[in-house]
Image: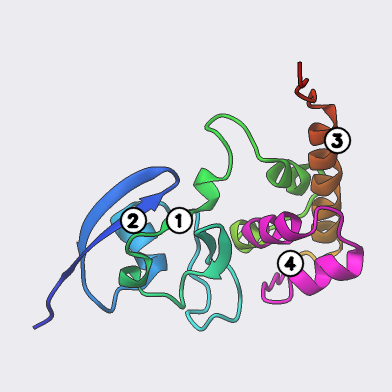
């Protein structure tokens, strides 16, 4: 008989309080308890990257963490990456550059790409490929994924460059 643990997790800006089994993986908490099915379960061994989410702003594989380890944390899933009704520039890049085929790896690829661009807004092709090493795609051959990240970086750079600078009057 297992004892459930109370956790409080902020997911995509919304606070959730739940009673969970201590062995429940974060990926299953997101999918089965919160019904956020954009985070995919691929290998359950941390090899494929289909389950990547942001935990306190850093990319993690949700199949390697227990839900109780996320207690008190902020989690961002693919559903929370952009405001409702719009796409994040990375999502747009994947769409426009055909960075997906079957789409199974896409949420994890996008979240891993977010991590890359957060730490390096102008990555080279080699840096993108290195940053995506923990994510497996069996369909695309990766070239369009790399192009998608490059396009997103350009769009993100252009949108920040276009923002007005506050005056110091």
Q: Distance between the residues labelled 4 and 1?
A: 28 Å
- Which of the two labelled residues, at mark 4 and mark 1, occupies the earlier sequence position? 1
Q: Distance between the residues labelled 4 and 3?
A: 30 Å
Q: Distance between the residues labelled 2 and 3?
A: 34 Å
Res 141 visible: no
Residue under numbered circle 4: 139
Which mark identifies residue 9? 2
Q: Is residue 86 magenta?
A: no
Whether the residues at callouts 2 and 1 have beta carbons within 8 Å, the answer is yes
Q: How far apart are marks 3 and 1 (CA)?
A: 27 Å
Whether the residues at callouts 3 and 1 have beta carbons within 8 Å, the answer is no
The residue depicted at 61 percent of the width and 31 percent of the height is 86
Residue under numbered circle 1: 75
Residue placed most toward the observer, 117 or 103 = 117
Q: Is mark 4 on a helix, strand or loop?
A: loop
- Which of the two labelled residues, at mark 3 and mark 1, occupies the earlier sequence position? 1
Residue under numbered circle 3: 158
Res 58 visible: yes
Q: Quadrant of the C terminus?
A: top right
Residue range (magenta): 110-139
Residue placed most toward the observer, 123 or 77 = 123
Q: Residue at the top extreme? A: 169
Q: Is residue 131 magenta?
A: yes
């Amino acid at each position: 008989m297992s004892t459930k643990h109370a956790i409080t997790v902020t997911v995509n800006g919304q606070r959730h309080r739940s009673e969970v089994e201590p062995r429940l993986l974060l990926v299953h908490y997101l999918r089965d308890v919160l019904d956020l099915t954009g985070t995919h379960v691929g290998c359950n061994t941390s090899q494929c990257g289909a389950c990547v989410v942001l935990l306190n702003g850093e990319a993690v594989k949700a199949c390697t963490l227990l839900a109780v380890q996320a207690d008190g944390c902020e989690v961002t899933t693919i559903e929370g990456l952009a405001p409702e009704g719009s796409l994040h520039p990375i999502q747009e890049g994947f769409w426009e550059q055909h960075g997906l085929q079957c789409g199974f790896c896409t949420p994890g690829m996008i979240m891993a790409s977010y991590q890359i661009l957060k730490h390096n807004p102008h990555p080279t092709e080699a840096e993108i490929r290195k940053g995506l090493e923990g994510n497996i795609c069996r369909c695309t051959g990766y070239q369009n994924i790399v192009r998608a990240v490059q396009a997103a970086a350009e769009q993100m750079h252009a949108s920040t460059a276009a923002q007005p600078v506050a005056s110091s009057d």
